[in-house]
Image (cartoon, grey):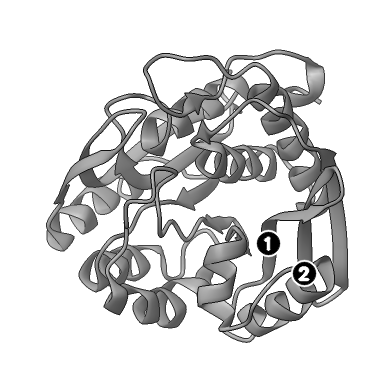
Amino acid sequence: MADRALVLSIAGSDPSGGAGIQADLKTFHAFGVYGMAVITSLTAQNTQAVTGIHDVPPEFVAKQLKAIFDDVRVDAAKTGMLKTPGIIEAVAGELTDRLSGRIVVDPVMVATSGDRLIDDDAILALKVHLLPLAALTTPNRAEAEVLSERKIRTTTDAAAAGQEILADGSGAVLIKGIEDGGDLVDVLVSDAGAEEFRMPRIETGPTHGSGCTLSSAIASAIARGASLPEAVERAKSYVWRAIERAFPVGRGSLPLYHFPISDETES
């Protein structure tokens, strides 16, 4: 077990367990990696709504990160909810010169419930300070529209928007959730061009935490040595099956079934 991969989540907390660091840690476990977490914000939320947010002071976010890096090897990391410019700058300051090629940035902006999870002035900080450190940025369609300042309706639109986001320094961009017939398509954009990853739409109703889960799965696969396209393919297969088995725990959106359900997490 000494060579087990170690993966870090830097994100907000969801006390209902469907998203944020709770979803990340479940995903890390499913992929057979050792999971760690730095908390950036505490939320009061359930499956229906976010009713409160308490941000961790930036200096304490930095202190958490420093404590880990002073003691523990980190093979890959993912970021999630980073609500303020100060938190973003604190995270970027601790990650700079560390984890080259092994940071997945999930630019969390809006919860499934529609509640905002980032301040307006934090978007510029994200583009300036964090995207240049990312091996991969994983916006959904709406987030990619904000980052690229382009409307996205088709996979061609997504490829063009991805190029705009690449210009901010991210090594690659995965734009998620483009509707194409009965499929949902994610478009991976890098210097090598654009590659599409298709999965049939699953009619489960609203789900919660799929973006957190996908970025954590990709970071886990990268930590275990997968190439970026392999990591995306493996992560998408895992998330698709987790959505397929989503189940109600409250009266709102369904959390995913994160537990190991096939061999793809171990391949």
Residue 8 image offset from top left, x and y in percent: 44, 42
Amino acid type of disc 2?
A: Val
Return the mark for residue 149. Answer: none
Up-down: is 221 above or below 156?
A: above
Residue at point 36%, 53% (across, down): 81
Residue density around tag 2, few if under 14, some if 14–19, many if 20 or more, within 10 Å: many
Does 50 sit left or right of 1 as displayed? left
Residue at point 44%, 44% (across, down): 112
Does 244 sit left or right of 187 as displayed? left
Residue density around tag 1, few if under 14, some if 14–19, many if 20 or more, within 10 Å: many
3D distance between C-alphas at marks 2 and 1 = 8 Å
Can you tell which quarter of the image residue 130 is in? bottom left
Q: Nearer the viewer, residue 77 or 240?
A: 240
Amino acid type of disc 1?
A: Ile
Residue at point 51%, 56% (across, down): 106
Q: Nearer the viewer, residue 267 or 181?
A: 181
Q: Which residue is mark 2?
A: 189
Badges 2 and 1: C-beta atoms under 8 Å apart? yes
Up-down: is 165 above or below 42?
A: below
Query: Which part of the image, by quadrant, shows the C terminus?
Result: top right
Residue 229 image offset from top left, x and y in percent: 82, 52
Q: Nearer the viewer, residue 99 or 153?
A: 153
Q: Which residue is mark 1?
A: 175
Residue at point 24%, 67% (across, down): 84
Up-down: is 114 above or below 83?
A: above
Residue 127 image offset from top left, x and y in percent: 46, 79
Q: Nearer the viewer, residue 151 or 215?
A: 151
- Closer to the eye: label 2 or 1: 1
